Amino acid sequence: MGVGIATVTDLQLNALGSFLSLLAVLTTCVAQIMTNTIQKKFKVSSTQLLYQSCPYQAMTLFIIGPFLDGLLTNQNVFAFNYTPQVLFFIVLSCLISVSVNFSTFLVIGKTSPVTYQVLGHLKTCLVLTFGYVLLRDPFSWRNILGILVAVVGMVLYSYYCNRESQQKASEAPVQLSQLNQIRC
């Protein structure tokens, strides 16, 4: 909610945008939960999972991407004039994408999809803050309020996660001693 308050400055709704947004949220949630589940179930590292899933992701994007691009822009992606500079930025974008995928799988594998989302919101807040501090981007009270709401949400999330893990850690020895008493 805080990131939305801080970043959404112009809101226009239409059917296609709403549908694509809903589709993006659903597929992202499913992908992040599946990533976490697969890593824990098969005990694989983020590198192993990325290595196995990248060919399928690339093939899917290669097949569906040009079709969707043509549908949304009414232009053929293969008819574009690809200069060396454009190709450089395409390759750079691909390398950044692989890095983002690797870090995503690494964070989700070590924590949870929800923690990954909280980390993403922290990144957004830092980008906004550094933009204001370093680049003197215009900042409104709405931006500040949004960042504060997001930071309070992250602090509360961290607090309750730590509290839950401490409870589990303190309950484990009690359960173990009860199990030993039952066996005796």
Image (spheres, rainbow, N blue to C red):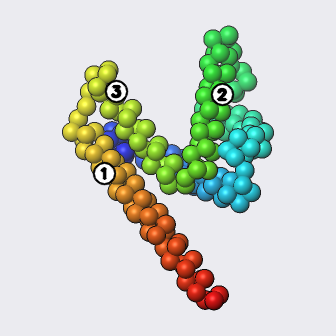
Q: CA separation, marks 2 and 1?
A: 34 Å
Q: Nearer the viewer, residue 72 or 102?
A: 102
Quarter of the rendering containing residue 57: top right
Q: In the image, 145: left or right of 8? A: left
Give the image location of residue 160, x and y in percent: 39, 61
Q: Mark 2 points at which residue?
A: 94
Disc 3 is placed on an element classified as: helix
Pick the front one: 130 or 79: 130
Would you say 71 lies left or right of 51 here? left
Residue with the most extreme front position:
184
Q: SS of the residue at dot 1? A: helix
Q: Distance between the residues labelled 3 and 1?
A: 20 Å
Q: What percent of the width, then of the height, locates residue 147?
A: 31, 42
Image: 30 above or below 56: below
Relative to 184, is 149 above or below? above
State the count of labels: 3
Q: Name the residue under label 1.
A: 152
| Mark earlier in primary sequence (3, 1) | 3
Q: Which of 141 and 80 is in front in this view?
A: 141
Within 10 Å of disc 1 (Cα), the crowding (few <14, some 14-19, many 20+) is few
Label 2 SS: helix
Residue, disc 3: 131
- List x then y, in percent, for residue 180: 60, 82
- Residue type, numbered disc 1: Val
| Residue found at x 63% / y 55% | 36
**Vertical position of residue 27 compared to residue 123: above or below:** below
Residue 47 found in image quarter: top right
Q: Write the residue at 44% across / 49% down.
A: 118
- Residue 21: percent from left, percent from top: 52, 48
